[in-house]
Each structure stands twice: as C-alpha cells, then as structure tokens.
C-alpha cells in the first residue's frame, strides 16, 4: 500500500522510507494501521477509460463497397425507368430484393464490430491485471504475528485515587502535566525494579515483573518516592497499587487473561497509599516485607473471594 501510494505521488520517497521502517518495527495490527490510516481514504487510481469501438456497420470496408454498388446500380435502373417512360415502376423489384441482402450484410458487419470490441476489452483487462501483478511483489511481506504464549508473570496495577476530582480541580492542561510527571516517576521505578510498563489507560498503569519480590520492592519504592515528593513540593497524587501473580497470555507484547483482570480488581480493593497483594504473591515474599492480613475479600466480577494482604511500606 505504501509503495503504491508513493507511485501515485501521495507520499514522497523520504516519507516512504520512514513509514516502511515503522512497518518493519510494528508488533501489532494497530501499529500497522497507524502507518497507513491516511492512505486508506484515498481512492485507487481509476484505469484509463478508452472509447468503446463503434458498432456502426459503415466502418466495414466491405459493407461500404456493397452499399455504394447498391446505390449506383439502383440509381442507374431508376434513370433507365425515367427515360423509358414506363407505367410500371419495375426498379422497385431488384432494389427490394437487393436491399434484403444489403440489410443482412449490415447485420453481419455490426456483429463483427461487436466481437472485435469485446476482444479489445478483454485484452485491456489482461494488461491491467498484469500491471497489478507487477506491483504486488514490491509490497513488503510482513512476517506472521507471533502466536500468543502463556507464561508466569507478576502483574502490578497502579491507580491514582480521586483522579476525576483532581482533574476538575487542576484543569485539563495542568492535569496532563501532572500525569506525565507521574508516569515518568513510575517508569523510573519500574526500570530500577527490573520490570516495565505494559500499557496505560487514563490514570492507571500496568507493569510486569518476573518475581513477586521485585514487584513489591518496586511498589514500595513508588510509594516512598511519592511521599518524598509530597514532603518536598507539597503535592503528589495518592496512588493505590495491586499485585497478583500467575500464568497470563502474552500476545504481541500485551498481557491478557484472568491474572491481569484480578490484579486490577485487587488494586480497587485498596485505599489511597496502600499496596495490596494476593496470597500467591505474599507466599513468595518470606520475611522481607511486613504484611497485614485483610482476610477473604469479595472482589467485583470475581466468582469467589480472594485472600488479600496489605504491605507495610512506611519506615
């Protein structure tokens, strides 16, 4: 699509090179769509319309000769009838008989023109298909997307408490600045803790880690960084953090499955400034972190109650 667009002049050679680079780097269908979205709206170049061959039998040289012979001969016969001064218009009879033959000749010439016109259209269609086939190999062949795989992950969700009210109080422009600063802080902590951001939606961020201990250590670092920011500058958003571990489906860099959904529900069960973990996460922490047992908690959309614990991170 990009090479055809360049051939039509929709994009120049430099932009073609930049976009092809983005195509080869793409890992999802959505990333491909972002490269070609403005090209899909353009109509494909219409094939040149050539005038259709006329079905006029007069274009046939044989028919023209026949018609001229008919007119000259019958003109001569009519002239003879006038000179002879006959009471009976006898030229009618040869003119009528010959006229039937001339009409059949005209029909045959018209059919011949029609067949020639159809043959020409088929030839043009073959040429058009050949041109399209010549373009097709130039399109970059994309490797098949990787098949989803299931693996053990530790999922962490962070959520800014009262974000709607905070947005209204700060205004959109200031809220965007605050969110960007907060995201930068999270990404620093993710990276330092051996994890990375998977995706972001609104004021919520999903990160993955290889071990529960690494995830909890990162969560503690986030809360302490926010507390320090609050002490120094007088403001930092209050954040809830939820952590759960298990087998999740990895599809094109994204994480899917019940483990991810449950981690989001665990986050919602916490209070602002808390770190909430599930029992599978707490079982791998040992004595490194002090926890407070919250017992079995009913979570929205989850069929059975889950054993949750709060991690003490102060001091």
Image (cartoon, rainbow, N blue to C red):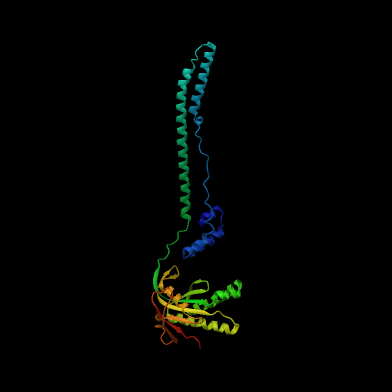
**Residue drawn at x 54%, y 15% as measured from the top left:** 79
**Quadrant of the rendered image containing residue 182:** bottom right
Side of 81 where 294 appears, left or right: left
Q: Residue 235, percent across and down?
A: 58, 81
**Residue drawn at x 51%, y 54% as measured from the top left:** 4
Q: Residue 28, percent across and down?
A: 46, 65
Q: Residue 219, percent across and down?
A: 48, 81
In the displayed orientation, state which residue is furthest to the bottom: 315
Q: In terms of depth relative to the viewer, which is nearer, 149 or 170? A: 170
Q: Is residue 26 above or below residue 135?
A: below
Q: Residue 255, percent across and down?
A: 44, 71
**Residue drawn at x 45%, y 24% as measured from the top left:** 100
Q: Is residue 46 above or below residue 111?
A: below
Q: In terms of depth relative to the viewer, which is nearer, 30 or 121? A: 30
Q: Is residue 91 above or below residue 238?
A: above
Tag count: 0
Q: In terms of depth relative to the viewer, which is nearer, 18 or 278? A: 278
């Amino acid at each position: 699509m990009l090479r055809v667009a360049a051939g039509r002049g929709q994009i120049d050679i430099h932009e073609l090179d930049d976009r092809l680079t983005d195509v080869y780097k793409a890992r999802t269908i959505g990333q491909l769509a972002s490269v070609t979205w403005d090209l899909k709206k353009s109509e494909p170049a219409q094939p040149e319309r050539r005038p259709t061959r006329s079905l006029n039998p007069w274009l046939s040289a044989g028919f023209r000769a026949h018609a001229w012979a008919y007119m000259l001969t019958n003109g001569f016969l009519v002239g003879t009838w006038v000179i002879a001064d006959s009471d009976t218009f006898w030229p009618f009879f040869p003119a009528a008989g010959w006229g039937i033959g001339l009409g059949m000749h005209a029909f045959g010439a018209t059919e011949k023109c029609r067949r020639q016109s159809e043959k020409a259209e088929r030839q043009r269609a073959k040429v058009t298909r050949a041109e399209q086939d010549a373009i097709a190999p130039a399109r970059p062949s994309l490797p098949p997307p990787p098949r989803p795989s299931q693996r053990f992950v530790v999922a962490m969700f962070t959520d800014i408490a009262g974000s709607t009210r905070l947005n209204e109080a700060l205004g959109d422009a200031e809220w965007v600045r605050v969110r960007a600063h907060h995201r930068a802080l999270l990404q620093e902590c993710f990276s330092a803790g051996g994890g990375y951001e998977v995706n972001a939606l609104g004021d919520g961020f999903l990160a993955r880690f290889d071990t529960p201990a690494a995830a909890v250590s990162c969560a503690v670092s986030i809360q302490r960084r926010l507390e320090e920011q609050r002490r120094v500058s007088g403001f930092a958003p209050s954040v809830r953090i939820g952590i759960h571990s298990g087998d999740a489906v990895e599809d094109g860099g994204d994480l899917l499955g019940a483990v991810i959904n449950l981690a989001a529900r665990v986050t919602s069960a916490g209070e602002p400034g808390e770190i909430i973990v599930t029992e599978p996460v707490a079982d791998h922490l040992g004595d490194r972190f002090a926890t407070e047992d919250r017992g079995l908690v009913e979570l929205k959309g989850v069929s059975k109650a889950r054993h949750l614990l709060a991690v003490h991170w102060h001091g």
